[in-house]
Amino acid sequence: MTNFKPVCSLASHFKLSSKQCPLSDEERNEMKKVPYASAVGSLMYVMVCTRPDIAHVVGMVSQFLSNPGKEHWSVVKWILRYLKGTSSFNLCFGNNKHVLDGYTDAYMAGDVDSRKSTSGYLMKFAGGAVLWQSRLQKYVALSTIEAEYITLTKGGKKLLWMKKFLYELSLVQENLVLHCDSAIHLGKHPTFHSRSKHIEVRSQWIRDAMEMKSFVVGKIHNDNIASDMMTEPLSREKFEFCRMKVGLVEPSKLKFTR
């Protein structure tokens, strides 16, 4: 990839599915010459350590490790081009506010093959992302509100885990807020549950956590939610906004203030 032209944004036009996998032995033998699994493994390492911006797309390409096709390989190469174009970007911290914030989002039926939804959550501390995940849900959600509710539960558990972790570091967190763009009323009002009996019981944990005031679920407009890039393809403008929102920037362009 040394001579490939770098790019500064992830493409939003890729639609990957199992239909793009090789069907003939000739195609499979040709793809065996491609270091697909090795490249995806390296990308997963980068994503887990310092690059939440590629979490969603790396999750997509990792679904086809057993039988990748040319289209899948093209996306992997695009990710490598993107990392080359943004190699100077770092996760930056230090806004003088040692506050933990959580963001969750879900993309309904995002997987083309299984129609499962994608869950994404992201935790920020002192202005930068410290914990993130983008993953397909274990079962098919029957509504958008269910997909959001499942993600809200996962994000809430991770937020409380981070609170305990920071407490051990003598960084006490109060008034925790978990930001999402929907599913708030379903968690706050039990009367809504008569119309949501199909949602698994395990997802109702979020209501108990809110009643115990473990944290507050706050409404945030979809245009401002940083975890959008964890669940779905975005326009270049929105993607760059989310990237900046989680503290992934070029240090040379930062303006430090006391």
Image (cartoon, grey):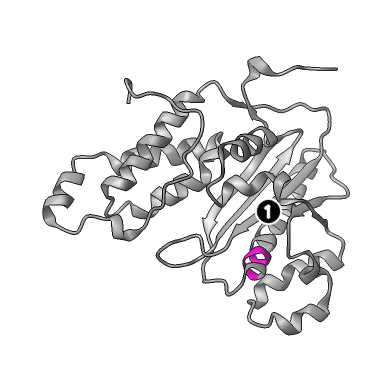
Name, please, the residue furthest toward the top.
Answer: 252
Task: Check disc 1 and give the amino acid type.
Answer: Thr
Q: Is residue 80 left or right of residue 175?
A: left
- The crowding category of the residue bearing disc 1, from other C-alpha atoms within 10 Å (few below 14, some 14 to 19, many at least 20), is many
Q: Is residue 67 left or right of residue 174?
A: left
User: Is 246 part of what is drawn in magenta?
Assistant: no
User: The C terminus appears in which quarter of the rendering?
Assistant: top right
Question: Residue at the location (71% across, 51% down)?
Answer: 222
Question: Residue at the location (64% across, 43% down)?
Answer: 131
Residue 18 lies in quadrant: bottom left
Residue 205 is situated, as x and y percent measured from the top left of the image, at 73, 69
Residue 227 is situated, as x and y percent measured from the top left of the image, at 65, 47
Which residue is nearer to you in this view: 42 or 234?
Answer: 234
User: The N terminus appears in which quarter of the rendering?
Assistant: top left
Q: How many marks?
A: 1
**Magenta segment main secondary structure:** helix
Which residue is nearer to you in this view: 200 or 237?
Answer: 237
Residue 7 sits above or below residue 142 on the image: above
Residue 19 lies in quadrant: bottom left
Which residue is nearer to you in this view: 176 or 85?
Answer: 85
Residue 199 is situated, as x and y percent measured from the top left of the image, at 64, 77
Q: Which residue is mark 1?
A: 104
Residue 59 sits above or below residue 253 on the image: below
The magenta span reads 146-150
User: Is 148 part of what is drawn in magenta?
Assistant: yes
Question: Residue at the location (61% across, 36% down)?
Answer: 237
Residue 2 sits above or below residue 182 on the image: above
